[in-house]
Amino acid sequence: MAKKLYRSRTDRKIWGVCGGLAKYFDIDPTIIRVIAVASIFCGTLGIWIYIIMAIVVPIES
């Protein structure tokens, strides 16, 4: 069975993107959130990637 990327319904703070990435890569969601916040402070590209993923990646059923 192939792994699929979904936004998390249960492990979410804003849109569930970081929780979904953490489930996909099987790591702690806090690590993904720290990386996301660091990328936001490094420039606006992190914000755009997060927004695009929130729109494109479907919510888990």
Image: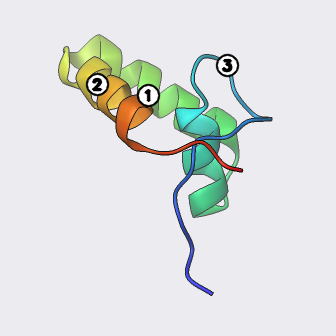
- Name which residue type carries label 3: Lys
Q: Which residue is mark 2?
A: 46
Q: Which residue is mark 1?
A: 36
Q: Which residue is mark 3?
A: 13
Q: Residue at x 19, y 24 (%)?
A: 45
Q: Nearer the viewer, residue 55 or 16?
A: 55
Residue placed furthest toward the right: 10
In terms of secondary structure, where does tag 3 sit? loop
Image coords of residue 39 (percent x, y): 32, 25
**The N terminus - image quarter:** bottom right
Task: Give the side of residue 41 with respect to residue 7, left or right.
Answer: left
- Name which residue type carries label 1: Ala
Image coords of residue 44 (percent x, y): 20, 14
| Between marks 3 and 1 in the image, the one whose residue lies nearer the viewer | 3
- Dot 3 or dot 1: first in sequence order is 3
How far is mark 2 from mark 3, CA to CA? 16 Å
Q: Residue at x 28, y 31 (%)?
A: 49
Say whether marks 2 and 1 touch (CB < 8 Å). Answer: yes
- Dot 2 or dot 3: first in sequence order is 3
Image coords of residue 18 (percent x, y): 56, 36
- Name which residue type carries label 2: Gly
Classify residue 12 by image quadrant.
top right
Q: How many residues crowd mark 2 within 10 Å: few (<14), some (14–19), many (20+)?
A: some
